[in-house]
Image (tube, rainbow, N blue to C red):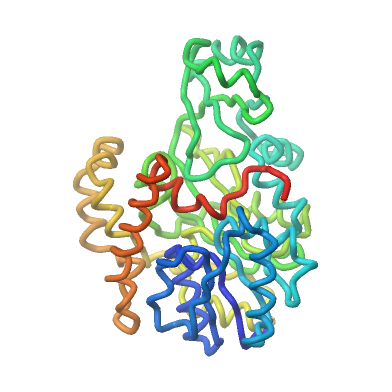
Amino acid sequence: MNIKTVLVTGARSPAALHLCRLLNEAGVKVYGADSDPFSLTKASNSIEKFILLPSAKFAADSYIEKLNKMICTYNIELIIPTCEETFYLSKKAEHLTCPVFAGDFKQLELLHNKYTFIQLAESCIMPVPKTNELSKDAVEDYSKMPNGFIVKRKFTRFSDHIMYGDRMESIPSELFEDTSEWIIQERLTGVQYCSYSIALKGEVLAHSVYKSEYTAGEGASLHFQHVPRPDIEDFVLKIVKTLQYSGQISFDFIVNESDQAIPIECNPRTTSGIHLFGTELIEHLQSKHSEMLYPRKEIHYMISAAMLLYGYSNIRKTKKTKEWLKIMFTSRDIIFNMKDIKPLFYQSISLINIWRQSRKNSVSILTQSTLDICWDGEEF
């Protein structure tokens, strides 16, 4: 892959900012684009220009039309999506005048749907949590499980729309009015791990794994350090080969008391695991090396502002005050960069805007952060 001009979409996220920096340092001309006018990457000197787009979710055709104009104007050779606009770009890829580095839409749908993903994992001979579509009969059955159950939407993110229970009364009655949107799943106990990989035509080119102990709410990880897990790597290799997948792909696992990694969901897009790679990632992707690239184990990063914001809840959850303090004083902040300092200060403006919009729309900050680009299985 020897691309000279790239457009990175989903420019609001720290992961997109990091990718833009890596591409820029490797000599690639980078443009950033998003429908959020206060996107974090807008302030970065790693991009040539920030392009404001219509909403991929609410104005998909206009979104594609604007992108084609930008492709022509700036001679874009490749679009790399980083957030959930990935689904819209993949579905509309044939209408774009340059390639999109993402999986086929049918693959993305299979992976993003928490019910069909579990079926896929099971077909690859992986241990999976017992999972069914929600029904009153299933609730009666799952109520007998020692750790209770989880009810969650088939399409969700950041562990949003998740409920824990152990009996019928745990579930709001209105959920049974449209059970097709929900699944019920055996609740697993253990430590959550996440993987992030880059694949091309069924081969994994780069791979990272990190433990997800410190999170924003139930889902988004805040601290990242590569932890080798051969069982997780084998699973990723199997899924990527089975699907002949190309693009970025991420998985969440629960490692149980028997040290067994059990897959629970997939995010077929960029996640924070990309922060564990430096410029060697772009060099590796541009070369013809066949071996897989791993991050250096000694490097670890954190989202400092969020580690502070969610500090009390994480200390209470993990009961590891000393470890939390050690991470705060020894980890690198994912946004801070002496060569590109503006995003460090601009993140406050981005966060205030998300907070104000979340109040206006009566949703959580995490929900608001992807409200105009998320995809929940609807037709478009």
> Between 85 and 334, which is closer to the camera in this rendering?
85
Residue at position x 39%, y 42% in the image: 364
Residue 96 lies, in percent from the top left, at 74, 71
Q: Is residue 230 visible?
A: no
Is 152 located above or below residue 147 in the figure? below
Is 348 situated left or right of 54 in this image? Answer: left
Is 358 located above or below residue 248 in the figure? above
> Between 24 and 50, which is closer to the camera in this rendering?
50
Residue 303 lies, in percent from the top left, at 33, 59
Q: Quadrant of residue 63?
A: bottom right
Residue 231 lies, in percent from the top left, at 59, 48
Residue at position x 45%, y 53% in the image: 369
Q: Quadrant of residue 127?
A: top right
> Between 88 and 100, which is closer to the camera in this rendering?
88
Q: Is residue 305 visible?
A: yes
Residue 314 lies, in percent from the top left, at 29, 42
Residue at position x 28%, y 52% in the image: 307
Residue at position x 30%, y 67% in the image: 332
